[in-house]
Image (cartoon, rainbow, N blue to C red):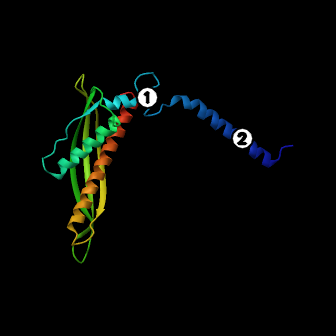
Amino acid sequence: MWSLEDSAVFRRAVGLAAAMLIAGLAGGCFQPLYGERSLGGGPGLGAALAGIEVAQIEAPPGTPLARIAVEVRNELTQGLTGGGAARPPTHRLTINLRTGGSSLIVDPTTARPEFEIVSLDADYRLVEIASSKPVLDGSATARVSYDIPGQQQRLGALRGQRDAQSRAAVLIAEQIRARLASYFAAGG
C-alpha cells in the first residue's frame, strides 16, 4: 500500500527523470560558443572573429583619448584573434570613442573630490568588406570609479585616473567582442 511519503518520493523521481530526459534531448541543440566547428560543419566562431579587422580609432594625438583608443584597439585585436595570427579580413570594425568624468564624492571642508568616475562610451560599426555593407551597429558604455588619496598626492590621483581609464578600455573591448560573438553565433 502506498503511503504519503512513498508518493512524494515517486513524484520527485519522475520529475527528476523528466528533467534529465528534456536536458538530454535539448543538449543536441546547443553549440559551444568558441568551438572549432559549427553544427553545420563550417568554420567555428573563432575563425569568424579572427577575420575582423579593427580599424585605427580616431583621436587627437597626445591626448588621454588617444592612449585609451590604442588600449581599446589592442584589447579587441587580442580578444578577436586569441593572440594568434589574424586571418584575411572579411569584416572591418570602426569605433568612435568619447570619454568624460565626474566627481562622485566631494570633501565638504576642502571642496576637493575624493572619488571620481571615468566614463567611456563607444559607438561601433561592423562592415562586410566584400559588399561594403554595414551589418552591425552598436554602442558600449563603461563607468569606472577611482579614489583620490589626498590633497598632497597629485601623482596618486593621476595614476588612479589612468588605471580607471585602462579598466574602462578593457570593459568596452569585452562588450564589443561579446556582441560580435553573438552576431556571428546567430549566423551573421
Q: Which residue is found at the position 66% from the left and 36% from the top?
A: 18
Number of residues whose C-alpha sits closer than 10 Å to that of mark 1, classed few (under 14), some (14–19) or many (20 or more):
some
Which residue does the numbered mark 2 point to in the structure image? 13
Number of residues whose C-alpha sits closer than 10 Å to that of mark 2, classed few (under 14), some (14–19) or many (20 or more):
few
Please state which amino acid type lies under the numbered disc 1: Glu
**Relative vertical location of residue 181 with respect to residue 150 in this rendering, above or below:** above
Please state which amino acid type lies under the numbered disc 2: Ala
Q: Residue furthest right?
A: 1
Element carrying mark 2: helix
**Relative vertical location of residue 101 with respect to residue 126 in this rendering, above or below:** below
Q: Nearer the viewer, residue 127 or 63?
A: 63
- Residue 36 bears which disc, if any? 1
Left or right placement of residue 44 versus residue 155 in this view: right
Count of marks, rendered view = 2
Left or right placement of residue 33 versus residue 112 in this view: right
CB within 8 Å, label 2 to label 1: no
- Residue 110 bears which disc, if any? none
**Relative vertical location of residue 158 with respect to residue 124 in this rendering, above or below:** below
Q: Which residue is found at the position 63% from the left and 37% from the top?
A: 19
Q: Which residue is found at the position 25% from the left and 48% from the top?
A: 121
User: Which numbered disc flags the more N-terminal residue, 2 or 1?
Assistant: 2
In the figure, residue 88 lies in which quadrant?
A: top left
Element carrying mark 1: loop
Q: Real-space Cα distance between discs 2 and 1?
A: 37 Å
In the figure, residue 34 lies in which quadrant?
A: top left
Q: Residue furthest left?
A: 61
Q: Quadrant of the N terminus?
A: top right
